[in-house]
Image (tube, rainbow, N blue to C red):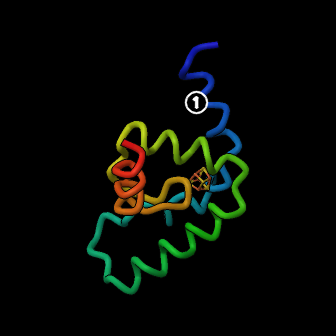
Amino acid sequence: MSIQEVSDLWQQAAACRGPNQVIFFPPSRLERRTDKRRREARAKEICLTCSVKDPCLDYAVGIREQHGIWGGLTENERREVAAVTA
Ligand code: SF4
């Protein structure tokens, strides 16, 4: 099994798959701060229920993903995690 296949396995169990996926990333249009906070809070609630939260966060921190909610954290929160673990 390749590294890509292992990566795909956790992604198949992601609670954010499907129509909710759009709330995990900023829209292409300008987003007001209050709308962003609300969207991120909804995404984080889904992450709390996700069985693959840990591998998701490890993956996002590992590739230094710049956008979206991954593993229940925003990009800024992931940067803080990466700085602590570096
Ligand atoms: S932790 Fe959140 S972003 Fe990661 S796979 Fe689960 S629902 Fe999606």
> Count of labels shown?
1
Left or right: 86 in relation to 71: left
- Quarter of the image for the C terminus: give it: top left
Is residue 24 rendered to the left or right of residue 80? Answer: right
Left or right of 26 on screen, residue 18: right
Q: Name the residue at 53% across, 48% down.
A: 57
Residue 12 location, x and y as percent? 67, 39
Judging by the rendered image, the residue that carries numbered circle 1 is 7
- Where residue 23 appears, x then y in whole percent? 50, 66
Location of residue 12 with respect to 75 vertically, above or below: above
Q: Could you say where residue 73 lies in the image, as x and y percent from the top left? A: 48, 61
Classify mark 1: helix, strand or loop.
Answer: helix
Q: Where is residue 36 in the image (x, y as percent from the top left)?
A: 39, 77
Q: Disc 1 residue type?
A: Ser
Question: Counting other residues with Cα less than 10 Å from the Cα at mark 1, is it few (<14), some (14-19), or many (20 or more)?
Answer: few
Front-most of 27 and 83? Answer: 83
Q: In which quarter of the image is the N terminus?
A: top right
Residue at image x 65%, y 37%? 10
